[in-house]
Image (cartoon, rainbow, N blue to C red):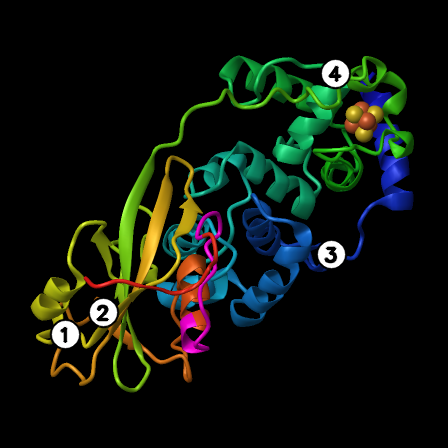
Amino acid sequence: MSVGFAERLLAWFARCGRHDLPWQDQPTPYRVWVSEIMLQQTQVTTVIPYFERFMTRFPDVSGLADAHIDEVLHLWSGLGYYARARNLHKAARIVREAHSGRMPETMDELMSLPGIGRSTAGAILALSLDERQPILDGNVKRVLCRHAGIEGWPGRSATATSLWQLADRLTPEKRCAAYTQAIMDLGATVCRRSRPLCQQCPVAEDCIARREDRQAELPAPRPRRERPSRAVVMLIVRDPRGRMLLQRRPATGVWAGLWIFPELPAQAAASGWCRENLGLLPTRIEDLAQVSHGFTHFTLQITPRIVQLDSEPAAIMEAGTMLWYNPEAPARIGIAAVVERLLTQVAAGKSISGEQDGPDGQLRITGH
Ligand code: SF4
């Protein structure tokens, strides 16, 4: 079965696969690594401009290692899942210190770097060095679960073990780079999450999901679990020059290292926060429509609260972890996407539309 599967896939790839992605040009371990990390949870079309900007600024691993984390996060702003960027940066520094600035070329060494798991390490070696290493990213899991009719959520360890064994059996001895790109492309463009294009699929003939009409059931979804929600207020403190106050998040936890608006518990008073941190009382307070932001383990219900000052504070407490952000001359710092959108809309004087709630999306005036 394995020879037939790989051969059919490779013949299809030669005709229909993607051959002009920017990371396929000079596929060094470094370029493949960055592309694989960016592609986790993110579409190819979204990744391309980010990848190109990243490579222009950091053409090699040493350049990335030497950069300040703020600049790395700045180039990542909008891609989401910022732990990926922080791990890239950390790993680049380890490569500089422990491997003399040369990307390691063994599975064990790659997997010892932050953010690189078995599938990413396999993809780096297969795509850049044509080494025979199976991979198992989201697209590949979908193809294999459907083709072989594998039951069970792929996140379960028993299912994952079966999938790795199958991925290994199907990987050919030669042309591993092309095969790896081919199976990823098949998952992304033909064996799509919804409405797969089975008529165009090179391995349709012996696909179990197709034969049993079970494409929509496989792979089995993650068992449902309630996601708790947490309510906070984000203070959009504006000074008379239109600048807005940002605060750097701690190095761990959600949005680690990014700059966001000062965050308060839902019941806390904005005026008390301003008095304590800025030595001033606001002249006007306005609530905007609530915004929901989903994290893996919980949903954050954010009430953006504009706080207008009529004079500039002499100093801010916690200088170094707070800065005045000028939308006219934006600083090169990493900003969480939800904050970036609020910044743009407030700077443009527009009302804010809630992502899920906020029935009219208009400003609501309250007296806090
Ligand atoms: S036949 Fe359809 S379900 Fe089966 S692998 Fe191909 S695209 Fe996926």
Disc 1/disc 2 C-alpha distance (Å): 8 Å
- Mark 3 or mark 4, whichever is nearer to me: 4
Is label 4 within 8 A of ligand 1 (CB to nearest ligand atom)? no
- Magenta span main SS: loop
**Residue with the mark numbered 4:** 148
Q: Amino acid at mark 4?
A: Ala
Q: Left or right: where does residue 44 sit relative to residue 15?
A: left
Residue 336 in view, yes or no: no
Q: Is residue 350 magenta?
A: yes
Q: Secondary structure at mark 4?
A: helix
Of the residues under marks 2 and 3, which one precedes in the sequence?
3
The three-letter amino acid code for the residue at tag 2 is Met
The stretch of residues the image draws in magenta is 346-358
Q: Which mark is residue 316?
A: 1
Q: Nearer the viewer, mark 1 or mark 4?
A: 1
Residue position marked by numbered label 3 in the rendering: 21
- Report which residue position mark 2 lands on: 322
Q: Earlier in the sequence, mark 3 or mark 1?
A: 3
Name the image quarter holding the C terminus: bottom left
Q: Is the CB of mark 2 within 8 Å of ligand 1?
A: no
Cα separation, mark 1 vs mark 4, equals 61 Å
Picture quadrant of residue 234: bottom left
Residue 246 left/right relative to 185:
left
Q: Position of residue 83 (x, y in %)?
A: 41, 48
Asked whether the residues under the numbered discs 1 and 2 touch, taking CB atoms below 8 Å apart as contact, a structural biologist would say yes
Q: Is 215 part of what is drawn in magenta?
A: no
User: Mark 3 belongs to which amino acid?
Assistant: Leu
Disc 3 crowd rating (10 Å Cα; few below 14, some 14-19, many 20+) is few
Q: Secondary structure at mark 2?
A: strand
